[in-house]
Image (cartoon, grey):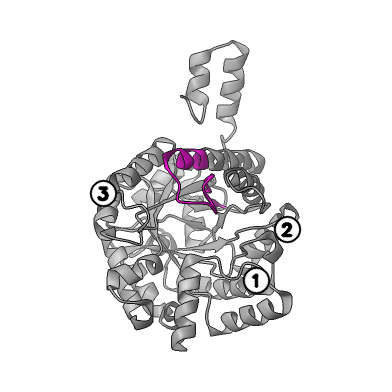
């Protein structure tokens, strides 16, 4: 293999088997896809060690993909239940699964997950740092964090959320903005808040920012896509589009180009909570500041008053965000803001996210996106119930 990553191959004019798979799934010309991957506008997260993967593309001109979060925590130590969620996600066609495990034998669960899953697997190394390193947060040294990145890459993880954009400068702006503008919800990103706490306790720079080149070298070795995490994302509609969010986004744009120079594929993460009237502008700003890199959004949730129904607030925001440029939606379940999701919550979250993604693909004119809707309409016209079942997101 005379290339290191999908981006490296694309720049060299090499058509990989993963590119062929994606081009076939997306009804896209292989040469066009290769150009999009080479420019960074499409990412194909595909760790060289994830042998069960059925490759998917994320980015410009492709179907909107969805991600399902799950994992082991101190409040839910049930490996069988989490694997049932994995199977449900795959049965419903989720293209990605993020293992957010932060307790117990995370390695064992992740190893089983990667061996089983044809969907892309993502992680947040910061979640796993304390357990993996068996140290209190205060006692972790800067380069210890890189050991977790290395371990996840070796295990076969396809993409990693790494919060590189919250450095001393952006943290300073955040604190100033919080004082002047009275941000209501502080830092709601778990990985971001842990890093911010570590920086405040030690007085040191964010290790993922300080040693960014070394992080990229690890990711390049296994062709892991970096998902640049938004530590300062808004946790309420009051805080959306504030100076903290946007100053970090500018930093993420700079980090995107540095990653591309090393042929590391990039996705950029975004809000969060956001009123409907701000969504389109935020999508355009991200694409401009981050040079067309694929945009991965959590929601956005368009109101803060619907606990128990945030799969709906998220689907509304996700449909609008994807219509205006977001490429990848992280599902939100009815349990958001309340508790850990059970199997029924996961199903509700997946269905809502799939609806949002598909509705946006129709609006964007993604090739053949509406074919199945036309098939459903014809089946309804002739009362063909079996064909209707086959077309439905949830046939049961």
Q: Where residue 78 appears, x then y in whole percent?
A: 31, 48
At horizontal 54% and vertical 44% (from top left) the residue drawn is 334
The residue tagged 2 is 278
Q: Is residue 150 magenta?
A: no
Helix, strand or loop for disc 1: helix
Q: Which residues are magenta?
A: 327-350
Helix, strand or loop for disc 2: helix
* Vertical order, 320 against 155 (above or below): above
Q: Where residue 150 appears, x then y in whole percent?
A: 30, 70
The residue tagged 1 is 246
The residue tagged 3 is 115
Q: Residues within 10 Å of mark 1 (few under 14, many from 20)?
A: many
Helix, strand or loop for disc 3: helix
Residue 15 appears in the picture as rendered: no
Q: Where residue 138 appears, x then y in whole percent?
A: 38, 81
In the rendered image, which quarter contains the N terminus? bottom left
Q: Residues within 10 Å of mark 2 (few under 14, many from 20)?
A: some
Marked residue nearer the N-terminal end (3 or 2): 3
Residue 277, by quadrant, is bottom right
Query: In the rendered view, does 138 fall on the left or right side of 368?
Result: left
Q: Residue furthest top?
A: 382
At horizontal 48% and vertical 58% (from top left) the residue drawn is 37
């Amino acid at each position: 293999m005379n290339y290191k990553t999908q981006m490296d191959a694309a720049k060299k004019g090499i058509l990989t088997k993963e590119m062929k798979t994606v081009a076939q799934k997306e009804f896209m010309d292989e040469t066009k896809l290769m150009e999009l991957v080479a420019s960074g506008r499409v990412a194909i997260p595909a760790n060289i060690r994830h042998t069960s993967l059925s490759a998917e593309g994320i980015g410009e001109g492709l179907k909107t993909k969805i991600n399902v979060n799950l994992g082991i925590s101190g409040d839910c130590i049930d490996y069988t239940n989490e694997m049932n969620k994995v199977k449900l996600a795959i049965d419903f066609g989720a293209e990605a699964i993020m293992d957010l495990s932060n307790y117990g034998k995370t390695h064992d669960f992740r190893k089983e997950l990667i061996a089983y899953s044809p969907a892309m697997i993502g992680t947040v190394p910061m979640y796993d740092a304390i357990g993996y390193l068996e140290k209190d947060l205060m006692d972790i040294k800067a380069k210890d964090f890189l050991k977790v990145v290395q371990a996840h890459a070796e295990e076969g993880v396809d993409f990693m959320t790494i919060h590189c954009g919250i450095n001393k400068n952006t943290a300073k702006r955040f604190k100033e903005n919080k004082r002047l503008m009275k941000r209501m919800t502080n830092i709601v990103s778990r990985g971001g808040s842990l890093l911010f706490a570590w920086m405040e306790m030690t007085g040191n720079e964010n290790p993922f920012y300080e040693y960014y080149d070394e992080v990229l070298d690890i990711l390049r070795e296994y062709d892991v896509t970096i998902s640049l995490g938004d530590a300062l994302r808004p946790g309420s509609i009051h805080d959306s589009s504030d100076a903290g969010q946007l100053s970090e986004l500018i930093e993420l744009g700079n980090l995107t180009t540095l990653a591309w120079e090393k042929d590391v594929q990039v996705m950029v993460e975004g809000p969060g909570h956001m009123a409907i009237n701000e969504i389109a502008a935020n999508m355009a700003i991200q694409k401009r500041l981050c040079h067309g890199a694929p945009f991965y959004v959590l929601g956005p949730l368009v109101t803060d008053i619907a606990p128990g129904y945030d799969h709906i607030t998220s689907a509304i925001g996700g449909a609008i965000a994807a219509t205006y440029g977001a490429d990848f939606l992280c599902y939100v379940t009815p349990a958001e803001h309340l508790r850990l999701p059970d199997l029924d919550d996961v199903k509700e979250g997946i269905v809502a996210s799939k609806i949002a993604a598909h509705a946006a693909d129709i609006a964007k004119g993604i090739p053949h996106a509406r074919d199945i809707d036309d098939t459903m309409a014809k089946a309804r016209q002739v009362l063909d119930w079996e064909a209707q079942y086959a077309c439905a997101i949830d046939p049961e």
